Amino acid sequence: MTVAEMKPGGTKPASAKVVLGLAECEQFLIQEARLLDDGRFDEWLNLFTADAWYWVPSQPNQENPRDTISLMYDDRRLLETRVRRLASPRIYSQEPRSRTSRMIGNVTIEEAAPDGKACTVRSKFQLLEYRRETQRIFGGTCYHHLIQGEKGIQIAWKRVDLVNCDAPHEGLVVPF
Amino acid sequence: MTPIAGEQIRSLVQPGRVHRRVYTDEEIFDLELERIFGSAWIYVGHESQIKLPGDFLATRIGRKPLLLVRDSDGNIQLLHNQCAHRGSMVVASDCGHTSEFRCCYHGWTYHLDGRLKAAPLLHGYPSHFDPKNSDTAMRRVPRVASYRGFVFGSHAKDGPSLEDFLGYMTTSFDDLIDRAPDGDLEVAGGVFKHTYRGNWKLYLENLCDAAHPLFVHQSSIDAAQQQSDDTYSDGSGEIAIRQMRQNGASYSFWEANVGIWTYPNGHSFLGDYHDDAKLVAALNDPVFREYHAAMEAKKGKQQAKKILDTRRWNSNVYPNLSFMSQFQQLRVVHPLTVNQTVVHAYTFRLGGAPTRMFENAISFANIVNGTGSLVLTDDLEIYNRIDLGLLSAGSEWLEIGRGYEGDQPDEHGGWRGKNSTSEIYIRNMFDTWLNYMAVEKPINGGRSSVSSHAAESRP
Ligand code: FES
Ligand SMILES: [Fe+2]
C-alpha cells in the first residue's frame, strides 16, 4: 500500500481515487457510523445504491433472508420507508429519541474486484444505545459490499450479525 | 402472606372498568400463574415441531420449563424439564432429537415418556426408595391434547376437554389450517422473541384493539402512504407496506365494516377485516394466482372460495395465544414477572402452497410483527408506557367500557361487539379472569356470574 493510499479518503475528492483501499473503506465506515449516531438517516440512506439491501439476520450463520425471519431485511424501497418513518415526529418508539455511540474496528477487506472498484469489507462494531433510563449494548460483525461509483463510495449491501441476534430483545428501532 | 380473598379480587373488575392493580400487583401476578396458567389449556407447540419419535422441543407454561416430546410410540408427551434426583434441568437445548434424556449432573436417564430408565449407584439408596415409582420420573403435565396439530397442556387433572375449552374458536384454527392446499401446516422460518416492560395481559388486549392503529402506528402509516403499490409481492415487503397503510383506515371503516366476536373462556377474534385485494394485488399478483389455483385444485372451486373469503384477523385464545390466519402468524405470550413479558412469534408454511407465499409470510413477520419491525415496535412502546403510567397515583380505575351498551349475543354462544372498536373482548377476558381468579380453588372455564356484559345486566 502506498502512502497516498493510506490517506483518509475525505482529504481529496472521492472520484479522484478509483481503487478502494483499506483506508478508504475504514473512513467510509466511520463516516457511516457518524451519520447514524447523528440521526442523519436521510444521508445514511443516500449511501446505498438504488438496488441495495440491508440485512440484520435473526440467527447466527443465517443463510437466507427469504425463508427465515430477520430482525431487519430491507430492499432499497423498504429501507426508504424505514427511514421515512424514522423521520416522523410521531414515531412514538423514538420519543424520546435513542442516543447511540458506535465504535468500529478490526476492518479487513475480504474480497475485492480485480479492478479495485468493489470490495466486501468486514468489520467489528460495538453500539451503545441509551433511551428512557436504560442503556443497551450491541456488538457483532458487519459486512459491507462497497462499490466505487460516480458519486463516490456506495453500499451495495450490508449485513449486520449481532452476537445476540437470537436473544429476546426489546424493540429495535434505530438501524445498526 | 395472607392470600387475597375471592371477594377482594372480585372487587377489582366492575362493569366497564377494571382496577389498575390487576396489572401492577405482584401478589395478583403470582395468583395468575397459579390459577390461570396453572389450570387453563395453554398452547405449548405445534406437532410439526416434533414430527418423529425422539423429537423434542423446549417449551413452557407460565414460567415452568417443559419439554414437548414425541415418544417412541409416536405419542405426544409434555414433561417437566426437571430431574427427579435433585432437580436439575435435564435438557438444555431448544429442540433436537434423542433416544433418551440424560441428566448431566449424576447421570440419571429417562425414557422419552419421562419414566426413569436407569440411575447409577442405586444400591446406595435407602430401602424405601423405589426407582419404579411413577413419581420418580420426569413428571408429566397432567393433560396434553391437540386440536388439528396445535398442542395444548393443562396443569389441571380434570376440567373441560380442549375442544370444549376452545369452543367456537376451533373455527379460527380451521381457518388457518384450511388455507393450506394440502391441509397441513409447518412451523418454519425461526422465532422472534420480543420482550417488554409491562404486564402480560396488555398484549392480547392490544391485538384486537381496532381503535389504536390510527394513533400508535401513525409513523408507519405515513411512511407507507408515501409509497406506491406494486403488483408483484416479491417477498420483500409489498404485503407489509399494504398492511401498514391499512392501519390508517378511518374510524368509519372500523365501525362500519369490521367486527369483533367474543366467546366463553376469554377467547375472541376480529373479523371481516380486509380482503386479500387490500393485502396483495390479489389475482393480479402471480404468486397469489398460483396459490389460488393450488387451492382450487385441491379443494374444488367452491370450497376454496369459501375458505379464502373468510376474513378473520387476530384470533385470541385466552390467556396467552394469538394467531392470524391470513398471514400464518402465531404469537405466544409468556409472563415473566408482573411487568416483564416475553413474546414468541412464529410463522407457518402452508403445505402445498407456492414457496413465495411462505416468503410473503416471512416478510410480513419481519416488517409488521418483528422485533425490528416498523409496526410492532410502536406497540411495545405502548406496553411500556402503560406500565409507567400505572405507577402514577392517578385514576385507580381503567376504562374498558367502549361499546358497552351494544354487546349482543352471537349465534354460536358468544357475544359480539357493536362494531370492531368495542372493548367487549377485554371485558370478556376479565370475565374469564374472574372465573379463574376469584375462587379459592381454581376452576376451569364457564361464564362468570359477575358478567360485565351490559345486555346481561339490563333489567
Ligand atoms: S440432579 Fe439429575 S442426576 Fe442428579
Ligand atoms: Fe398495534
Image: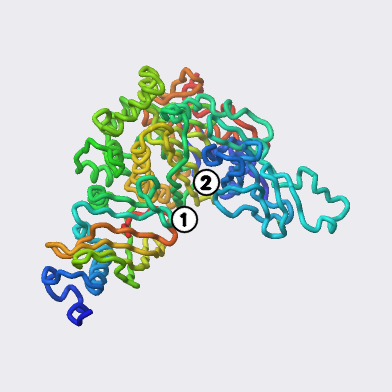
**Labels 1 & 2 near each other (Cβ < 8 A):** no
Residue that mark 1 sits on: A167
Q: Secondary structure at mark 1?
A: loop
Protein image colouring: rainbow
- Pointer 1 indicates a residue of which chain? A
Q: Position of residue A160 (x, y in %)?
A: 35, 59
- Residue B334 got which mark? 2
- The percent coordinates of residue A97 (x first, y second) are 31, 58
Foreground pick, B410 / A106: A106
Q: Is residue A11 above or below residue B339?
A: below
Can you tell me whether the CB of the residue at mark 2 lies under 8 Å from the nearest atom of ligand 2? no
**Secondary element at tag 2:** strand
Q: Which amino acid type is shown beneath numbered disc 2?
A: His
Q: Residue at x 17, y 73 (%)?
A: A10
Q: Quadrant of residue B295?
A: top left
Give percent across and percent down for residue A159.
Answer: 32, 58
Vertically, is B223 above or below B319?
below
Q: Please, which chain is the residue tagged with disc 2 on?
A: B
Ligand 1 sits in which quadrant?
Answer: bottom right
Q: Nearer the viewer, residue B455 or A90?
A: A90
In the image, residue B4 sits, relative to residue A111, either above or below, namely above
